[in-house]
Image: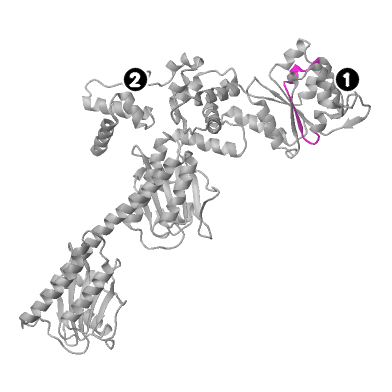
């Protein structure tokens, strides 16, 4: 109950003076940060002295609806302190019986008929008289100012309460200034971090280095323990890249990727992640089925942020950040920062003009290069590798047949590296490049003085290849005399050096290769049938490139990566239409010719992605260009009656599809400015 007694004019002047002092603490700070902690403590002290109470405190509402006393004034050291005390109040229940936005004045807590909770509160903080004034901001309850007389009863005067209410409003203003500043400060901090990442991206030339660096920066900035990119390829497979984690020393490093690819169709939670286009905030591993899937089955952790990587409003992947320990709830700042970093990754991918198809090619290529496997994924190349592996760990002679440039030497090396002889020598000899008079000396060696120019002993290729592999390339080019000598070695693995009678025995595995039909050569009398049967123990025919055109994209990307290093340029890929052009050619020179063409095209190329236009200067492609989807060949069918606005929209969207999201190129093809294109796209987005 309020006392009707008014206070003196002198007392009112003191109150106004105190109010002005509190205002002075706010006003000079409007354009910069307010130290809210200092401001609130000073205000509580000012109010405690002004109100002449034993204790004045400020109770702050926590997110769990608990009150905590964060600021306190005591008239002297003998007054019991309640600083730091947490008060579990059911504010929702109290709000049904009490107006928590109005002051509560209790002259004597021992005789009050108020809610029993107030008596318990008063006893807990040793208060006889209590005045509680709420602090609200836009109907949000921030906390309470508490005024306590510990032993004596006090009649709270109306003028005093109104004065405290005015101060509570000032405190709310201080809160508001602080929030505005902190939001701007956080926005500035987000922009600063994203700018730093953007600068890092611009400095890096290699996409793998960009993504790895960005994920590691994310862990350091957001204090996460594990991070990676989960990317969706054109086959709807999700694969994991740029896997990083914080080590025991606290250093962030890229780790081995032991996460297996996942089929999107088999995991409903993953489908939702790649369709919702929203950041997934997982606060606990036990919250729901989604949390359990991500934090217990897919990853190991207690909390996670999964932010979409959006290109043209399509989720191409997600940035995954995982915290291994329980943590406080994620703030809007942290969520926005994760989303901003994911957007930076999207910009890097878009800049590289990487479609889901190109990402899939890069993933397959990376795996094959790492495993030192022949490049390709067609059934023919799979069968070829299987045949090679079947014979690799034997000592059987292998005959590789195929057109020039099909990769016979590459396959020979592959067989050697997958055999028990992998640590032994691999000696290559081009039989067609050695003169007939020197063939015997080259293969078997010679003694000093064996012939005019034999000034010292020389070890032959068979001895060099002992306990390893001897690769006889273009074996059909050997002379009849050399064929006889080779046959003798193949029969018992023994030979003698030229000019010596000593028999030398070797343990050599023979792999022979030819680009001619040896059976036809036998019929023409150019190749010995008995040597053919010795070599043809395990024949492997390599397919021509025209018979496995589905491997051209992988091979082209492989050669482009190689020549990126040789030319000092950084290429991100080859456009779909350019790949169609490469597939339209029959490649009589096979893989070797493709390698030469990619190198020739890469040298003058200006863009980071090779297009049809880059290949057209090469004569062999000029007649093939009409067969592929170039801008001149693409057609857009429009039904009669379609509005002009819809025709324009279809044309813009189809052009963007053709350019794989390259807005600059799309604007050029459409004959409009980039700003016009961006404005149109923004309009279409708003209409969705």
**Residues packed near mark 2 inside 10 Å, few (<14), some (14 to 19) or many (20 plus):** few
Q: Is residue 580 above or below residue 373?
A: above
Which residue appears at 88% of the width and 24% of the height? Answer: 498
Residue 441, magenta (yes or no): no
Q: Give 57 or 586, whichever is nearer the viewer.
A: 57
Residue at image position (28%, 22%) is 638
- Residue 273 on image: x %, y %: 39, 46
Residue nearer the viewer, 163 or 192? 192
Query: Do we see residue 22 in this rendering?
Result: yes
Q: Give above or below for 639 relative to 269.
A: above
- Mark 1 or mark 2: whose residue is earlier in sequence: 1
Q: Secondary structure at mark 1?
A: loop
- Magenta-colored span: 465-479
Name which residue lies at 29% across and 25% down: 651
Residue 436: mark in rendering: none
Q: In this figure, which residue is indicated by the disc labeled 2?
A: 635
- Residue at 94% x, 27% y: name it: 501
Q: Which residue is mark 1?
A: 452
402 up-or-down from 573: above or below:
above
Q: Position of residue 71 (x, y in %)?
A: 27, 75
Relative to 445, is 46 on the left or the right? left
Under circle 2, the secondary element is loop
Q: Who is closer to the viewer here, 174 or 225?
A: 174
Instruction: Please indicate whether residue 507 sits to the left or right of residue 559 in the image.
Output: right
On the image, which quarter does residue 265 sit in?
top left
Q: Residues within 10 Å of mark 1 (few under 14, many from 20)?
A: few
Give the spatial CA distance, label 1 vs label 2: 74 Å
């Amino acid at each position: 109950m309020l006392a009707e007694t008014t206070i003196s004019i002198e007392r009112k002047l003191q109150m106004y003076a105190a109010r002005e002092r509190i205002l002075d603490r706010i006003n000079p700070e409007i354009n910069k940060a307010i130290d809210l902690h200092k401001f609130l403590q000073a205000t509580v002290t000012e109010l405690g002295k002004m109100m002449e109470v034993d204790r004045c405190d400020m109770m702050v509402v926590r997110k769990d609806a608990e009150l905590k006393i964060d600021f306190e004034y005591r008239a002297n050291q003998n007054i019991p302190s309640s600083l730091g005390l947490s008060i579990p109040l059911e504010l929702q229940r109290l709000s049904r019986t009490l107006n928590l936005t109005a002051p509560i004045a209790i002259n004597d807590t021992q005789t009050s008929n108020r809610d029993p909770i107030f008596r318990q509160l008063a006893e807990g903080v040793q208060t006889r008289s209590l005045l509680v004034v709420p602090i609200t901001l836009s109907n949000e309850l921030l906390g309470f100012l508490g005024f306590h007389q510990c032993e004596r009863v006090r009649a709270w005067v109306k003028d005093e309460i109104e004065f405290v209410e005015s101060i509570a409003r000032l405190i709310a203003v201080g809160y508001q200034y602080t929030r505005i500043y902190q939001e701007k400060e956080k926005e500035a901090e987000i922009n600063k971090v994203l700018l730093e990442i953007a600068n890092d991206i611009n400095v890096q030339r290699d996409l793998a280095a960009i993504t790895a660096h960005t994920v590691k920066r994310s862990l350091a900035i957001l204090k996460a323990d594990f991070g990676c990119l989960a990317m969706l390829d054109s086959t709807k497979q999700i694969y994991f890249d740029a896997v990083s984690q914080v080590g025991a020393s606290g250093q962030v490093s890229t780790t081995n990727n032991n996460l297996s690819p996942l089929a999107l169709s088999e995991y409903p939670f993953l489908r939702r992640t790649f369709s919702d286009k929203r950041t997934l905030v997982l606060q606990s591993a036990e919250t729901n089925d989604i949390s359990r899937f991500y934090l217990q089955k897919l990853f190991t952790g207690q909390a996670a942020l999964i932010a979409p990587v959006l290109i043209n409003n399509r989720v191409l992947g997600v940035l995954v950040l995982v915290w291994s320990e329980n943590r406080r709830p994620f703030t809007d700042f942290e969520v926005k920062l994760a989303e901003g970093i994911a957007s930076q990754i999207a910009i890097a991918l878009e800049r590289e003009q990487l479609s889901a198809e190109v990402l899939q090619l890069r993933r397959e290529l990376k795996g094959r290069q790492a495993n030192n496997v022949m490049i390709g994924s067609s059934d023919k190349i799979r069968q070829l590798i299987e045949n090679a592996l079947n014979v690799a760990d034997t000592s059987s002679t292998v005959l590789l047949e195929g057109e020039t440039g099909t990769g016979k030497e590459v396959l020979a090396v592959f067989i050697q590296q997958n055999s028990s002889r992998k640590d032994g020598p691999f000696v290559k000899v081009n039989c067609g490049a050695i003169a007939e008079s020197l063939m015997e000396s080259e293969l078997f060696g010679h003694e000093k003085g064996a012939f005019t120019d034999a000034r010292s002993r020389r070890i032959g290729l068979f001895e060099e290849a002992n306990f390893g592999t001897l690769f006889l390339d273009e074996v059909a080019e050997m002379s009849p005399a050399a064929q006889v000598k080779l046959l003798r070695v193949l029969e018992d693995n023994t030979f003698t050096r030229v000019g010596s009678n000593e028999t030398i025995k070797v343990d050599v595995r023979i792999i022979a290769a030819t680009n001619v039909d040896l059976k036809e050569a036998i019929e023409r009398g150019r190749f010995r049938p008995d040597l053919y049967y010795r070599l043809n123990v395990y024949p492997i025919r390599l397919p021509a490139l025209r018979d496995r055109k589905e491997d051209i994209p992988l091979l082209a990307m492989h050669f482009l990566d190689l020549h990126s290093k040789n030319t000092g340029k950084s290429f991100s890929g080859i456009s779909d239409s350019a790949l169609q052009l490469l597939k339209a050619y029959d490649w009589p020179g096979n893989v070797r010719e493709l390698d030469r063409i990619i190198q020739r095209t890469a040298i003058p190329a200006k863009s980071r992605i090779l297009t049809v236009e880059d290949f057209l200067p090469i004569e062999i492609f000029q007649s093939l260009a009409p067969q592929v989807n170039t801008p001149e060949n693409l057609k857009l069918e429009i039904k009669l009656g379609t509005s002009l606005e819809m025709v324009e929209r279809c044309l813009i969207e189809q052009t963007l599809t053709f350019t794989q999201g390259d807005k600059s190129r799309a604007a050029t093809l459409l004959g409009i400015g980039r700003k016009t294109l961006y404005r149109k796209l923004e309009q279409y987005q708003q209409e969705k």
